[in-house]
Amino acid sequence: MYDEFAYVYDELMDNVPYKRWADMLHSLIMKYGISRPCNSGGSRDKELCTEQEKLRSERDLVLDLACGTGTLTELMYQKGYDMIGVDISGDMLNAAMEKRDKSGSDILYLNQDMRQLDLFSTVGTIYCLCDSINYLLSDEDIEKVFSLCENFLYPGGLFIFDFNTVHKYEDVIGDSTIAENREDVSFIWENYYYPEEHINEYDLTIFMESRKMKGCYRKVTETHLQKGYTLDEIGRFLEAAGLEMITAFELSEDEERPEDAFTESEMLPCGAGEQERIFVAARKKPGTIC
């Protein structure tokens, strides 16, 4: 998954509003969560002495689940959060670690399948964006991932994620084909929708410039499968995992705004079935740390 695509991922995904998402995440964490950036009381001190300080350090850890090339992870680090990134693709993580080397951040990256998430401690916040949840194709897989998130969340911790809806795959993407030609890379994105399973197959054909021979291009093909979900289904999965849904919303698609002008008014309550991408914030029930 994302093997060759990893090398051109950032170029082809340059329309993703990472800055806006980072602002949204920060807003949700500050409103509903327990994690705090180091510039507002958190700490990156690795030599913690007291048990209370160790627990606080876990509370302030933030996990970017399915972090990809680490663009959003870096933005959250810049906001002061103590970050961990997990992704199944080693190539994606290589790109993320190149960014870490350039920025000088101390983000910890782990090569793991989200269905087998295994952390060294609990964390105060987990987020999983860019429709990564849609790669979970069965009820068993999504229930397992939600249960693992619940297990590794500090009591009262926040789980924030997005997902593409059945409506998006069925009525918007459908069986469409998207093609684009850029200076260093071109791609053909063919979609095939299977309504009975709510699964969208997309076949990527990428023509990418060779990193060794300037002016020469390689043809790369990849196939990805994603499953659409309804908000009711997601609610049931969260409940089964012991997580409490706090809010579900879509982001306003108004005309471009200044990047630093994010406000909660852009988070629109979900209406009746016409959303393409829904964001959800859920919480692990508070408990006692012994």
Image (cartoon, rainbow, N blue to C red):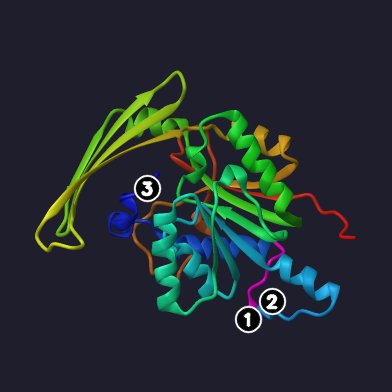
Residue at the spot 69% in from the left edge and 76% down from the top edge? 42
Image location (x, y in percent) of residue 147 = 69, 42
Tag nearer the camera, 3 or 1:
3
Image location (x, y in percent) of residue 3 = 36, 49
Image location (x, y in percent) of residue 24 = 53, 61
Secondary structure category for the residue under label 1? helix
Numbered badge on residue 39:
1
Residue at the spot 28% in from the left edge and 59% down from the top edge? 11
- Name the magenta segment's main secondary structure: loop
Asked whether residue 34 is drawn in magenta, I would say yes
Answer yes or no: do the residues labelled 1 and 2 have beta carbons within 8 Å?
A: yes
Answer yes or no: do the residues labelled 3 and 2 have beta carbons within 8 Å?
A: no
Please rate how many residues cluster around mark 2, counting C-alpha atoms within 10 Å: few if below 14, some from 14 to 19, many from 20: some
Secondary structure category for the residue under label 2? loop
45 and 170: which is toward the camera: 45
Amino acid type, mark 1: Asn
Can residue 122 be seen here? The reply is: yes
